[in-house]
Amino acid sequence: MSTPHTGQEPMTAGQRAPEGARSGRLRVAVVTPEGAIFDGEAHSVVVPGHDGEVAFYPRHAPFVGALGYGELRLSTGGELKRWYLEGGVAEVADDRVSVLAERVLPVEKIDARAVQAELAAAVASVPADEPAAAARAALIRSAQARLRLAAQRPPPAAY
């Protein structure tokens, strides 16, 4: 039986595996211009890539990629942490995942009504030039992604 190619050369005698490979975990840092959102260990990380979701697990091959609009998920063993993520870049090397994002918002903080109003205003707007059209398109993609995540979250518990 062959093992999957991870982009890493096999270890030779005397070499040590990266810390994450030994523990079966990834070291993850999620940072925005406002500061750190998460810094800790996870079993897996899923990011919204520029052209679809990308998942990272221990021993993942080195990776650098642009991020789009969507859900950032971290499995920390028994707990799934979820955020809305907007733009940026993800890098993976030696069981370390660095997510440098333009915007990160906890899913439970998404106000669906406010986002619906934002989306309606963006759709109704008429851009005056090419930069305004690009900004409008980005706002529409962002609002649509946030609404998808808001629809997926469980309703608040009744007390």
Image: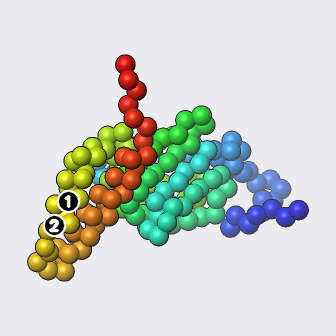
Q: Is residue 19 visible?
A: no
Q: Are marks 2 and 1 in contact (CB under 8 Å)?
A: yes
Q: What residue occupies the far left of the structure in this picture?
A: 128
> The disc labelled 1 sits on which kind of residue?
Ala
Residue drawn at (57%, 39%) of the image: 76
Label 2: few (<14), some (14–19) or many (≥20) C-alpha neighbours in 10 Å: few
Q: What residue occupies the far bottom of the structure in this picture?
A: 130
Q: How far apart, in angstroms, are the residues tagged by discs 2 and 1?
A: 6 Å
Q: Quadrant of residue 25?
A: top right
Q: What residue occupies the far top of the structure in this picture?
A: 159
Q: Which residue is mark 2?
A: 124
Query: Residue 106 at what x, y percent from top left?
Result: 37, 42
Residue drawn at (59%, 56%) of the image: 56
Query: Residue 141 at what x, y percent from top left?
Result: 32, 64
**Relative to residue 16, is residue 158 drawn left or right?**
left
**Relative to residue 67, is residue 21 drawn left or right?**
right
Query: Residue 59 at what x, y percent from top left?
Result: 67, 56
Which quadrant is home to the C terminus? top left
Near-viewer residue (70 or 36): 70
- Considering the numbered disc 1 on the image, is that residue within a helix, a strand or a loop? helix
Query: Residue 24 at what x, y percent from top left?
Result: 68, 44
Q: Which residue is mark 1?
A: 120
- Considering the numbered disc 2 on the image, is that residue within a helix, a strand or a loop? helix
Residue drawn at (53%, 40%) of the image: 80
Up the image or down, 60 lies above or below 125; here it is: above
